Structure formats: C-alpha cells, structure tokens
Image: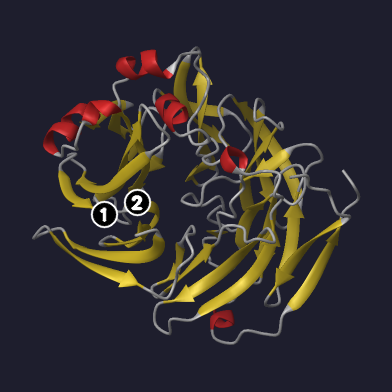
Amino acid sequence: MRYSYFKFKKIYLHDSYNIVEIKIKNRHVFCGYYDINPFSSCNDKLLLHISSRNLDKTEIAYYDIGNHKIFKLCNTNVNSWQMGSRLQWFMKDKIIFNDFVQEKFVSKIIDIKGNILRIIDYPLYAISKKRTIALSLDFFLLHLLREGYGYRNLNKRLYNYYSESVNSIDIIGLDNNKIQNSIRMNCLLKKFPIKKPHDYYHYFNHLSFNTNDSHFSFFHLWKSRYEEKTMNRLFIADLNCNIIFLLEEKNRISHYTWKNEHQLLITTYINGKCIYVKYTFDFIHNTYLREEINDLSNDGHPTYVDLNSFISDTYPNRLSYQNLYIYSENTKDVINIASIYSNPMFFGVKRCDLHPKLSVERNIISVDVHLRKTRSVLILDNFRKRSMYEPKSQVLVYYNYSRP
C-alpha cells in the first residue's frame, strides 16, 4: 500500500493543555520506553535521544523545559527503537545510560555537562530507586531474538552466539561494580520446565523493581527455532534471586507497571482478548490475589498517576490514531486526553508507541510520536487530575507542516 504525506497532521486534545513539540529536522528525537521517567526531579529537564534515521549515531541530550532549548551532552554507541539506551537520571544532575566500548557493553554515568564520572562494566536494564543495585541482561541476545529491544553492536549469528551467552539476569552492585546474584536460564528451566525446551531459543526481557526495591519482576520468553512463534511467562523474584511466584503461565503477557511494593498491574491476553490484571502479593506468606479489570480491552503502556488511577495509551486504529487516556480504578471511567496521529509507514520493529511518561510532580506528560518521517517528542503541560472527572469539550488543534 502506498501512503502519501499530507500537508498537516492532526492532534486531538480533550482538555486544555499547553503543548510543545521537540523536533530536529532529519533526526529522530525520542525519550524511550515508558518504564523510565525522563523528567528531572526539579521538573525542569527532559532527557532525550537524538539519532540518525537508522539509529547508527545517537547523541544524549536534555531539553530545558522552561527555556525551550536542547543541550547535547555526549554520544552513545547503542540504541534501539523501543528501549533506547535505557537513558535515565541517576541522581540529581547525574545521568546514566548504556554504551558499547572496546567491544563490550557497559553503562556510563555523566554529569549535566557531559563529563564521564564512572563507567560500570555491565549494561543496565533497571536501576533500584535507592541507586544501590541494578539489573542486567544480555542485550545482544535480546536483539537477536526480539529485534528493536536489544543492541546490535556485535557481528555474530544467533545459532553460534546462543551457545556462548551466559543468558542470565544479573544483580549488579553499583558501589563495587560486581555481580551480586544471578538467575541463569538453564537453572530456571530445570526448576520451571516447559515442554520440549530444546525446540526454542530462550531469553529474558522486561525487568522491573517494585517500588521499595525488595523484589523484581521479569519475563521469560521462548521463541521457536522452526517458526515465528513466541511464548512468555511472568516471574517474581527477591534480591537473592529466589523465584517467589510464577504467573500467567498459560497467557501471553504484554506490559506491566508496579502500583506499589506489593501490587503489580499487567496486560495479558486470554483467548486472544486483552485484559488488565492486578496482582496483590503477600511476600511474607508467599501468596497473592489476582483481580481482572474488565473495563479495558486495548493493550497499552500503563503508569500510575496516583493510588487509584493510571495513564496509558493504545495502538493505532484504522485511521492511524493512537489514544492517550487516564483510567480511574474507583469510578471505572476512561477519560481520553488526546488522539495522536502515527505515521503508518513505520510499523513493526520501527513502530513508535506513545510510551506516556509523567513528570515527578505529575503535571507534565511526554509522549514519543512519529508524525512525519522522523520521531519527535510532545510535552503536554498543565495536566490536571480533575480532568478525569470534569472532561471539557473537545478542542481540535492543527499542526501545520510543509511536505518533507
């Protein structure tokens, strides 16, 4: 199918927001996956990847929200369409991201001027809230088995590399730069076996600490060696890498977010239908409650706004619009915030999900968008919780663009 570029793209807003687009001609500008908050603690800076069209060259930068300026800090040799470089704030005025140096994946900590402060010998996926430990996995294996999520820097084939990889989740001590504990795939498969394990390639993805850093969740995925078929299941482990729970073994899990230290929200598919499920864990007695939320049927990327509501998005509809909305667990209301056009020429690995992210003070939303030939970032300021309960009349906003 052939798509033509129109002279304008549309963004439908369902409330009164100040909206800014961060863009650079012929460059991709985006934040990354929804599970990392790119906003600084003072609410005045937003971390960005600025990349070439094929992601070969990537700069680390931040956007000064008050002055509407972009400050480029340094380069990184790793990037991916979904995960980026796992760019995030480490501490106040310190930034951490993954890189590839001397044929090895590492992570770097820099200051606000781009000066390198530390190099950690492992690429990091998730960092604890207290910044004392982090979770790591094999990002090249992730790339080979789930393109768009890992890093492609090594020149090796899947069949050969799979036998080389340790294929583990590692807990890294950020103070001593050492592995403290690990979950190895071969050990996991012995304790939690599947049928015909040698017919599949196995890998880890989607590692996430709970809100008090006492436990973490992760996906075990296995991909058929003979056909395009992938399955997954969800685990919960403690910091000693003891597996506490095996969840959704018969259903396909998609996305996740921790509500608090003992509650996890996920999207999962049952008989082809997407539903939201909330788990409440009792880690003392090793039990849990499972509650299905039947008011939502569209898969998305959820993040809690407060104790009783979360923000999420949808995939593009037949008109190529993605919805940004907020859901109230108390009232069961779904309030649309915006409908945003997504360029249909970019799909599959290169698709651009909104991946909504909230500022620390919960008053600014950022989303990654693909309105034209390159990605950009939209900032919706003046976000108010009352919009959940008092939606205003729809406002139609046009952004005029010349033909690329």
Q: Nearer the viewer, residue 30 or 372?
A: 372
Residue 13, horizontal then vertical, whole percent? 70, 72
Q: Quadrant of residue 11?
A: bottom right
Tags 1 and 2 touching, CB below 8 Å: yes
Q: Is residue 284 left or right of residue 175?
A: left
- Residue at label 2? 252
Q: Residue at x 38, y 16 (%)?
A: 159
Q: Is residue 107 left or right of residue 231?
A: right
Q: As displayed, is residue 195 above or below residue 395?
A: above
Q: Residue at x 41, y 62 (%)?
A: 274
Image quadrant occupied by the N terminus: top right
Give the percent coordinates (x, y) of residue 163.
30, 16
Question: In terms of secondary structure, where does tag 2 sit?
Answer: strand
169 over 243 or under it: above or below: above
**Neighbour class for label 2 at 10 Å: few (<14), some, many (≥20)?**
many
Name the secondary structure under disc 1: loop
* x 70%, y 39%: residue: 28
Please tell me whether residue 69 is drawn above or below residue 225 in the rendered image: below
In space, the residues marked 1 and 2 are separated at their CA atoms by 7 Å
Closest to the observer, 133 or 26: 26
Q: Residue furthest bottom?
A: 390
Residue that label 1 marks: 248
Label 1: few (<14), some (14–19) or many (≥20) C-alpha neighbours in 10 Å: some
In the depicted view, which residue is nearer to us: 62 or 347? 347
- Numbered tag placed on residue 190 in the rendering: none
**Amino acid type, residue under disc 1 in the picture:** Glu
Q: Position of residue 131 (x, y in %)?
A: 37, 43
Q: Residue furthest right?
A: 402
Residue 128 position within the rendered picture, expressed as x and y whole percent measured from the top left: 35, 45
Three-letter residue code for mark 2: Arg
